[in-house]
Image: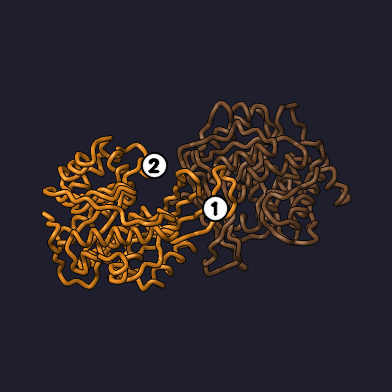
Chain colours: A orange, B brown
Amino acid sequence: MFHFDRRIEFQNKDNDILTVGELLVDMISDDYNDDHESDSYRKFFGGSPSNIAMNVKKLGVNSLVASAVGEDGLGTFLINHLKSANIDTQCVQRVDYSTSMVLVNKSKGTPIPTFYREADYHLAYTPEIENAIAKSKVVHFSCWPISRTPVRETVEKVMAVARKNNLLVGFDPNYHPMIWQKGENGVEYVKKIISKVDIVKPSEDDAERIFGKDSHQNQMQKFLDLGAKLVIMTLGKDGALVSNGQETLQFDSLATEIVDTTGAGDAFWSGFYTALIKGKMIRDALELGFAVSAFKLQHTGAVVDLPKLEDLQGQYHL
Amino acid sequence: MFHFDRRIEFQNKDNDILTVGELLVDMISDDYNDDHESDSYRKFFGGSPSNIAMNVKKLGVNSLVASAVGEDGLGTFLINHLKSANIDTQCVQRVDYSTSMVLVNKSKGTPIPTFYREADYHLAYTPEIENAIAKSKVVHFSCWPISRTPVRETVEKVMAVARKNNLLVGFDPNYHPMIWQKGENGVEYVKKIISKVDIVKPSEDDAERIFGKDSHQNQMQKFLDLGAKLVIMTLGKDGALVSNGQETLQFDSLATEIVDTTGAGDAFWSGFYTALIKGKMIRDALELGFAVSAFKLQHTGAVVDLPKLEDLQGQYHL
């Protein structure tokens, strides 16, 4: 049971957060163009768990990323980017596949990404990763790495070892059939994973893709029934609902200005984890997560120049 | 036997040249940068057989491309590009994989491309392709599509049906282990393919990758021994040697100015095929191929604004 007015007690460890999954390049068109005639693109550091690792470092705790990139220029670019943020890259593997890429043509509607998955799904379970789990407090992953084998087996081992080492396990159930390997029912697998994690943060759309249409309360109950201990259901401009199985809290959005929604969910995770590690009560950590998300919404890009958590706390009067 | 002073007699057909293989996006960095720090890229229409189809159309004969692209924006871009050149896209398939891409970071040395192969290797053998073979005079392909399955099976069927229909079969033995599927000896397969085609155009490097180091004459003999009927061995600035198994011709390079070497080999094929179809003797068609290549070398890009073959002929006094 996660009491909202209690802290999560972590053992004293060398590292705070270990994120597992994709480290990749976002290749984004310079122009808004729905006819795909935009010719110029710009490359960005990307991948949800990698963005979280960058964010929490800026907010003031330590992080490691377990991911696989290619033996190519884009892989070098990504590793250098992590290093320049003083993130240790001991768990970033270089494999004989091209560095994964997501190509996005900016659109006035919902941009449809094109996925080039190569290196990322060849992440192997190694002694370096085992060591990283042992010395971390939190492990985080999303649907991306579990959507394909062989990296899925790596995530399963990470979860098993994380449990043995009493890590807090956060999972983003951002299920989408588009990323799933062909010929497999991803929904059933995602449900199985939910039963093995502590915290999930579905959006309304995620919940609908997994369970079909239903009321917010019913959707949250389904995640709880599967075994999640804390369900954070985000409702866009309507804020969020959070249930620990006994009580449901309602949070208003703290966003005052929305410039770019990219990475807002990862910004929440980043603020929430950082606050938990810094000893905040769960209720306050949630509030701080939403504050970081609101800050991010005011700035363009998936990873923005976040202040220290304490500075943000003052800014949002929390 | 291909007598240098004879024409190749083609049956009267609706289409001239059918190219089979990759239709893809070349994503090329704007800046020369060996540290992979270049952030801006530009997308180009690409893929060697597709470039040849574009070239021959400009030179004055008809072409079709058999290739597979994704159901995505880049696929639409490529198809629109072919259509804008008045090339029929009946043999361009749309498949449930991302449109293939080659990313190139410009370099003062040899740029190392990063391959994102998805849609292209899922080209299926269809009634449209069978129909296109039946109505074409020449079929052309390179090592790219035979380097992976399942498209390899499609190329094998194309070759078998092309033979039955008496098409001229041209093959670019541009073998490189980098594009080959892992765990397979590509060289042995390429040798098997050479035995089934009429014309090959290896560079010195291609020959060395396939047979190891040897003299030009010996290398050409190896291609002939395998079964190729005409071997065009290109020697960069030293021109080319061409053997029909009885006689070897030496061609000087016609290049006066080298601005960009990208696509120079495809420009040769384009001029050579166009000239053969227009009824030139093989010796003259070779000369015209080298003239088109020399023209291309003066311009930047893989597909440049070629004049009609007849205009080029005057320009190079051929």
The chain to which mark 1 is attached is B
The residue located at (64%, 48%) in the rendering is: B223
* Residue kind at label 2, given as amino acid type: Met
Q: What element carries label 1?
A: strand
Q: In this view, does A69 lie to the left or right of B35?
A: left
Q: Is residue B269 left or right of residue B281?
A: left
Residue B146 showing in the rendered view: yes
Task: Look at discs 2 and 1 and give the one toward the viewer.
Answer: 2
Q: In this view, does A60 lie above or below B64?
A: below
Residue B22 showing in the rendered view: no
Q: In this view, does B133 lie above or below A31?
A: above
Could you say which quadrant of the image residue B260 lies in?
bottom right
Q: Which of B231 and A15 is in front in this view?
A: A15
- Label 1 neighbourhood size at 10 Å, few (<14), some (14-19), many (20+)? some
- Residue to which mark 1 is pinned: B102
- Label 2 neighbourhood size at 10 Å, few (<14), some (14-19), many (20+)? few
- Residue to which mark 2 is pinned: A178
Image quarter (top left, top right, bottom left or bottom right) of the N terminus of chain B: top right
* Residue kind at label 1, given as amino acid type: Val
Residue A200 position in % (x across, y down): 23, 51
The residue located at (71%, 33%) in the rendering is: B16
Q: Is residue A90 above or below residue B15?
A: below
The residue located at (50%, 45%) in the rendering is: A108
Residue A176 position in % (x across, y down): 35, 43
Q: How many labels does the image show?
A: 2
Q: Which of B235 and A48 is in front in this view?
A: A48
Could you say which quadrant of the image residue A47 lies in?
bottom left
Q: What element carries label 2?
A: helix
Q: Nearer the viewer, residue B199 or A269?
A: A269
